[in-house]
């Protein structure tokens, strides 16, 4: 026990991390306990660092309670896939694990990775074994550490893709915890007697809170770089990447009623050369480690460390840790967030198909067999799969002959890319019910139907092709990055949502509250009015979000602190 620390004022999780012997906790005992499907409360925190969350099926909660049974506990497993690149063999492993141990679906997340839902405690070890055998892992996919590093996803859109994806992987690897706890617990590695764990980057209590990093190549902002704790924006000059602008302190989570919590867009603090990026990432993480709030987890993200101490102070602190100063910011221009769909040929002379997966849920329906089709493609492709930060998949790097086969397989299983509205193309919904314990309302299971209804309105005004970013979440934590949407819907209670307008198409502006706690009928009525006005009074090429600000439907939010929910 470290007597210099006043444990009484720190959050409970700080003590758990410290006592966990570098993330071992009592997980082995919890796994061996046959009486319950759950793990101990302390281990539910520690297991996050190993890439899993204990959950229960909320759809059958009441029934279980009435039968005096414990909730139907199971686990969400989140994989670590830097930049979302998955080989065909890895895709096949995940596909079969979904059927064997999970609920039969693969969830592509907003951070370019897979989640399996519904894995029982008794099957955790076998699932993790298979994932690791395929050369993927789940280390640090969750927990108070750096999470899955995101990267520009589409190889067809930039000749710099290979450089950027390599960088994302290197940042992710560099920031992995050094403890062997994961390997001992899940992969049966023997603890070396007398060996001492050290965490030079994280220390013995890891970070105060989760930490997120992304690398993007303008003009595409497909990772929503301003929502990340730390972002790197490629600066291209003379046909090469000459450096990266550094953005710090983005973050979206907030809590209804707690006005000291708010979404915040990242601030650009300068730039660095490509070979400084890993050093910069390490030192930014260390500054947050040493200055983040360890008493109140609601205020522990890097964005609050920055707003508490000031951007200039945090910048100078990072420079102090680095031992050198940042270079000046170089102006860059973003044109959009989201994904560009369809087949595109890259400068690598290969074909890349960006394929829409609604809500990121890969599954087979009665007639449309997406999961089967993607499995079959994995058996014939000569390229990779790339998961995008917008919950889609790119069937990447295929030759001419394979391209034809991919099209044929998609057609055979009735899941060829079809003409969908510009609104649906730009939609994201978080998981929400039934698995997310924090959800107040539906999101993934509801947004597709709501979009069909909004599409009728868009159609009425000849706007069905108009690209408008819409995002829905079941609570204000922001997992679907709704605060950056042109139309944001955030669940308040079953069937009720706050409606936000005014985000920019480029992901560079927060939206603002337009209507509070409304149901579907009212959402549609409100949107009908605004969409009609947009059709009649927009400027040439004006995006919906910009229009709602220009016309005063909502005011522009300049700083996260102004945000209201
Ligand atoms: Fe998230 C918690 C799902 C991206 C902000 N998020 C959760 C949990 C684990 C609920 C929990 O703590 O028990 C959700 C599990 C639901 C389920 O059943 O699967 C969950 N988050 C997701 C995913 C799967 C949403 C999706 O549909 O794709 C995304 C997984 C990303 C990944 O692969 O790592 C996901 N979460 C995000 C993002 C977006 C992003 O990172 O780009 C955010 C907003 C950005 C940010 O972090 O500020 C986000 N999730 C949160 C928060 C609020 C954090 C905060 O600062 O307050 C929570 C709650 C928490 O940490 O206490 C949370
Ligand atoms: Fe759950 Fe809320 Fe995240 Fe949706 S936004 S997945 S409801 S925590």
Image: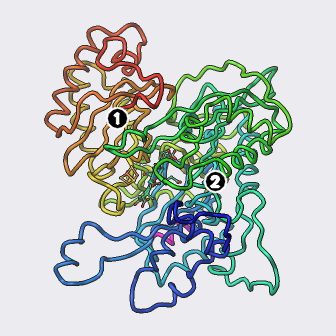
Q: Quadrant of residue 462?
A: top left
In the rendered image, residue 408, in percent from the top left (x then y), is placed at 49, 50
Give the left or right position of residue 123, taking residue 178 as reference.
left
Residue stretch rendered in magenta on the structure: 93-100
Say whether disc 1 or disc 2 marks the residue closer to the N-terminus: 2
Q: Is residue 98 magenta?
A: yes
Res. 103 mark: none
Quadrant assignment for the C terminus: top left
- Name the residue beneath numbered marker 1: 488
Q: Quadrant of residue 143?
A: bottom right
| Residue displayed at 19% across by 47% down | 495
In the rendered image, residue 192, in percent from the top left (x then y), is placed at 80, 84
- Name the residue beneath numbered marker 2: 146
Quadrant assignment for the N terminus: bottom right
**What main secondary structure does the magenta stretch of the protein show?**
helix
Q: Is residue 300 magenta?
A: no
Determine the secondary structure under disc 1. strand
Asked whether residue 306 appears in the rendered view, the answer is yes
Asked whether residue 241 appears in the rendered view, the answer is no
Vertical relation: 153 (above or below) 312: below
Q: Nearer the viewer, residue 301 or 76?
A: 301
């Amino acid at each position: 026990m470290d007597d210099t620390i006043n444990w009484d004022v720190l959050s409970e999780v700080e003590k758990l991390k410290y006592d966990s012997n570098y993330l071992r906790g009592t997980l082995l005992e919890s796994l061996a306990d046959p009486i319950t499907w759950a793990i101990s409360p302390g281990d539910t925190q520690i297991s996050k660092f190993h890439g899993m969350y204990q959950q229960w099926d909320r759809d059958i909660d009441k029934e279980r309670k009435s039968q005096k049974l414990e909730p139907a506990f199971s686990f969400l497993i989140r994989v670590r896939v830097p930049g979302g690149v998955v080989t065909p063999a890895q895709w096949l492993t995940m596909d079969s694990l979904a059927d064997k141990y999970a609920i039969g679906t693969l969830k592509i997340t907003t951070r370019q990775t897979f989640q399996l839902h519904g894995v029982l405690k008794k099957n955790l070890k076998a699932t993790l074994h298979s994932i690791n055998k395929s050369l993927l892992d789940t280390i640090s996919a969750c927990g108070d550490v750096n999470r899955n590093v995101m990267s520009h996803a589409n190889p067809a859109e930039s000749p710099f893709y290979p450089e950027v994806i390599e960088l994302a992987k290197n940042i992710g690897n560099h920031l992995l915890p050094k403890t062997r706890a994961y390997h001992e617990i899940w992969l049966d590695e023997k603890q070396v007697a007398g060996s001492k764990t050290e965490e030079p980057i994280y220390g013995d209590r890891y970070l105060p809170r989760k930490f997120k990093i992304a690398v993007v190549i303008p003009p595409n902002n497909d990772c929503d770089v301003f929502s990340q704790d730390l972002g790197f924006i490629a600066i291209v000059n003379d046909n090469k990447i000459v450096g990266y602008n550094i953005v710090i302190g983005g973050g979206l989570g907030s809590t209804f009623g707690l006005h000291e919590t708010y979404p915040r867009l990242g601030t650009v603090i300068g730039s660095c050369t490509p070979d400084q990026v890993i050093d910069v990432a390490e030192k930014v993480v260390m500054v947050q480690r040493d200055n983040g709030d360890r008493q109140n987890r609601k205020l522990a993200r890097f964005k609050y460390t920055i707003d508490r101490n000031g951007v200039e102070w945090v910048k100078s602190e990072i420079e102090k840790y680095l031992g050198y100063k940042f270079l000046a910011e170089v102006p860059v221009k973003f044109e959009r967030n989201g994904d560009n769909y369809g087949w595109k040929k890259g400068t690598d002379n290969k074909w890349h198909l960006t394929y829409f997966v609604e809500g990121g849920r890969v599954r087979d329906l009665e007639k449309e067999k997406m999961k089967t089709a993607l499995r079959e493609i994995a058996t014939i492709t000569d390229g990779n799969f790339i998961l995008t930060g917008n919950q889609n998949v790119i069937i990447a790097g295929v030759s001419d002959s394979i391209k034809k086969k991919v099209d044929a397989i998609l057609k055979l299983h009735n899941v060829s890319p079809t003409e969908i509205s510009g609104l649906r193309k730009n939609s994201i919904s978080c998981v929400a019910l039934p698995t997310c314990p924090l959800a107040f309302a539906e999101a993934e299971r509801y947004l597709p139907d709501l979009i069909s209804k909004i599409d009728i309105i868009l159609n009425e005004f000849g706007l069905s092709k108009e690209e408008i970013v819409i995002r829905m979440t079941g609570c204000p934590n922001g997992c679907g990055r709704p605060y950056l949407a042109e139309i944001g819907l955030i669940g308040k209670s079953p069937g009720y949502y706050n409606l936000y307008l005014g985000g920019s198409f480029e992901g560079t502006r927060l939206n603002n509250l337009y209507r509070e706690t409304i149901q579907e009928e009212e959402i549609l009525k409100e949107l009908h009015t605004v969409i009609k006005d947009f059709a009649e009074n927009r400027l040439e090429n004006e995006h919906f979000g910009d229009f709602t600000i220009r016309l005063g439907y909502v005011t522009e939010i300049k700083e996260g602190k102004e945000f209201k929910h």
